[in-house]
Amino acid sequence: MHLTKIYVLFILIFGVIQVDRTVVAQVHPLAVTSHSLKGTVIDSLTQRPIEYATVSVQDSAQKTLAITYTNSEGVFTLPIAQAGNYVLFASFVGYGTRRIPCIVQPSVTSQELRPIFLAADVQVLESITVRGQRQLVEQKPGMLVYHAEDDVTNLGGTAADVLRKAPVLSVDADGNVRMRGSQNLKILINGRYSGQMARNPADALNMIPSDIIKSVEVITSPSSRYEAEGAAGVINIITKKSLSQLSGAMEAGFSNLEAVFNPRVAFSTGKWDINAYAHLHRSRVKTESNLTRQSIDGTYQLNQQLIMNNARPHGSGDVSANYEADSSQVISMSAAWWFGNWPASSNQQYQIQQGTQQQAFLQQTQTQGAPNEGLEVSLSYLKRLRKPEQSFFIIGQYNNNFRDDFNYYARQVDLENRLLYQEQNNNHMHTNEWTFQTDYAHPLARDGKKILEIGLKTVLRDVTSGYTTLISSSTDPAQLQISAARTNVFDYSQNVLAAYAQAKWTASGGWFAQAGIRLEETYLNGHFQTTLLPFTNQFTNWVPSATLVKKWRDSNSLTLSYTQRISRPSIIDLNPNIDARDARNLVTGNHDLRPEVMHQGELSYSLSAPSGLFLNTTLFGKQTANSIEDVIQVNTSGVSTTTKQNVAANKQYGMNVSTSFSLLPDWSLGSNARLSYLNFQSRYLGIQSEGWSAGINVNTTYKLAGHYTLQAFGDYDSRAITLQGYQTSWLYYSLAVKKEFPKTKVTIGFSAVNPFQAFASRSDVIIASSFESTTANRYYNRAFKVTLNWKFGEAGNQRSRRGVDNDDVKSSGER
């Protein structure tokens, strides 16, 4: 592997550090005119400044001479009348008090102290309860944060239900998440990319209970520290981590479509903090679709009805432990596992007219469980160094998706139940993945306001997909024989080496700037056991990013950002195994795919008023080259084949608006709206598709006397443009009521999803040069759920935990 570019980048980085040290060493203090002590108060674990910390000075007689509070950046200035020996005290609620002897020299009337680190003291608040209300949505540079734990309506659901309420995002009927209309995004859990997300994000989100979610970071403009993968952006789901001696919850929910059980426990003993949760879930998915497809020249017409009704038992669990050796060192360990069956059995009826000939037959397809099992372990070390914001972090992660089977058996009969055809496809996939990442933050100024961050990362991924297809002949439909053309073993490796450097600068007047560059080298190798030729690809990506923020009056901010992103194809997109569960609509992979590259710029304004009003408005524009799109082609017999191809480019311009406020003291309302114009162009297919799309969701909560809470949520998506057509509009809504029993910490909830209609509808329309088709889908998602939640113990402080940002492979919701 050629690592010359990475070596050159790191030589430049360390050269900057050495130059900075030389410059700092030559700086002399300027003459000042008054005695004062200046410094910064910092959280010893998170390295973040502590606002409103109390700082005081006492003389030798223990008389307090001056007292002040730190500002939003943790900075304080204490006036001193005369030189002498003093003792400085720094304290804040929830932290221990620091006592620091200091000497004020007569010749040095302005003295800069070393950063003062305060360690958290969880015992301080044992007998005090502090209640407060913060906005559900908060803006940070490059991202919007949805504080899901503060939304009382997130009871008894899954991560998919939480993401429906997050800004910028939309979740469709199948549970697929889109950011600004695109599914090419990465979903992280506590900064880690999980193997279950690679298989199918919609299924993986159903494995995460809403009760454990603390917040959701919607990162629309990721910095260079993040992996370049995920053209649309990154979603980071932060789970709850309690530091109390013992706490947890037991949650159970039942409805006509699902049953769920979610136990959670956390405890802290000295230097150890341990958190664990489990999720057991059985869901039922029922859909119907009616497909009509006809050729432009009128030579054939297909009418097809499909019914799917499947139960999907699945579960997951996670155990994490943090060992705090001292206030500057943390060792973290975690293990996660998942299991589940995801059947997609169906009954289909076909009516085909080709010329003067007519044909009708039935097909029953059974999937044999579609089991999926995996394990993930990680170990990390975080070291906080002496200077403000100076830290070193290293992590290793191993992911083993050791069972990812998808086996189906299809049987075709005529209207008199005579056997016409049989097919059996067995596909076993296994994934091994190693990830290593290290990050170093170096302050370029003593106050920590100028920071250089550098890092290295490698992802080593090996995937094996073995598939066997047995088919029958028209002359002997009862006999199954191996199809050599559709039987193979596909071995695929994807190795990514990356290095990044970025600088952060916090200036006076509310200015903040961040800029960086990331280098990624990707090496792809694939070979087949028989027939198909091996392939090898290698490509280099330089990925820049920049953000500029202006903040004033602590409530208004203006942010300008630019980022470049890429999306690499997953093995499911590459795998040539033909999915023929639908005899007239085949799906297969394309091993010639290359990554797509996206450029995006955005300008956003954010307002956070003391009254609780939050408003964020973002204008964005993005352009994608070499876009990976689903392409549907139909042969002369009317059979369609769907595969992903690099055949298009697209441009998108739009606006997102997020707001939350209180109509009355007990009545709050939040809303997220999106509007965009999308333009697809494909010279290869001779297609130009363009149009507007919009969506809005509204979430309102009203608190009644007696600890009752009422909630209503609605989400509407307008018609959405695709490369070869469009999707019709979509409506999702829910109603809920909750009753809390504070003394016993028990909560009972009742919710209804789409209660006034048996199903929700959405159609897919394809308009091509040789055919037109319409698929009318019905999603039977009307549900009535009862949820019981019991919490025990005391809620402790939250401690942040780093993970690998392993978002370097494009997920696929299709098999």
Image (cartoon, rainbow, N blue to C red):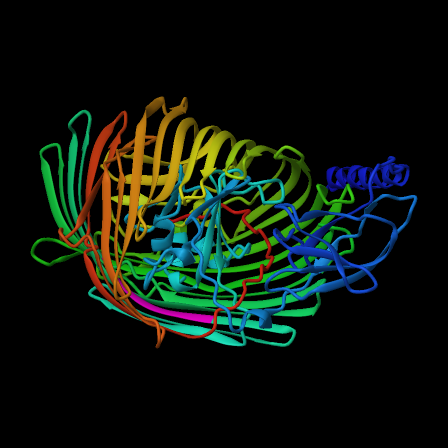
Nearer to us in this view, 716 or 490: 716
Q: Does the stretch in magenta take in 182?
A: no
Residue 487, visible in the rendered structure: no
Which residue is at a point 52% across and 68% down the rendered structure image?
A: 796
Residue 64, visible in the rendered structure: yes
Residue 393 at x, y percent in the picture: 69, 56
Q: In the rendered structure, which segment of residues is drawn in magenta?
A: 277-285
Q: Is residue 184 left or right of residue 176?
A: right
Position of residue 445 relative to residue 150, above or below, is above
Q: Is residue 366 left or right of residue 372?
A: left
Residue 633 at x, y percent in the picture: 31, 34
Q: Is residue 620 left or right of residue 477?
A: right
Nearer to us in this view, 559 or 277: 559
Position of residue 602 relative to residue 334, above or below, is above
Nearer to us in this view, 153 or 92: 92
User: Image quarter for residue 612?
Assistant: top left
Which residue is at a point 81% across and 37% down the rendered structure image?
A: 16
Residue 118 at x, y percent in the picture: 69, 61
Which residue is at a point 35% across and 61% down the rendered structure image?
A: 407
Position of residue 578 relative to residue 31, above or below, is below
Q: Does the stretch in magenta take in 282?
A: yes
Secondary structure mostly taken by the magenta-highlighted segment of the chain: strand
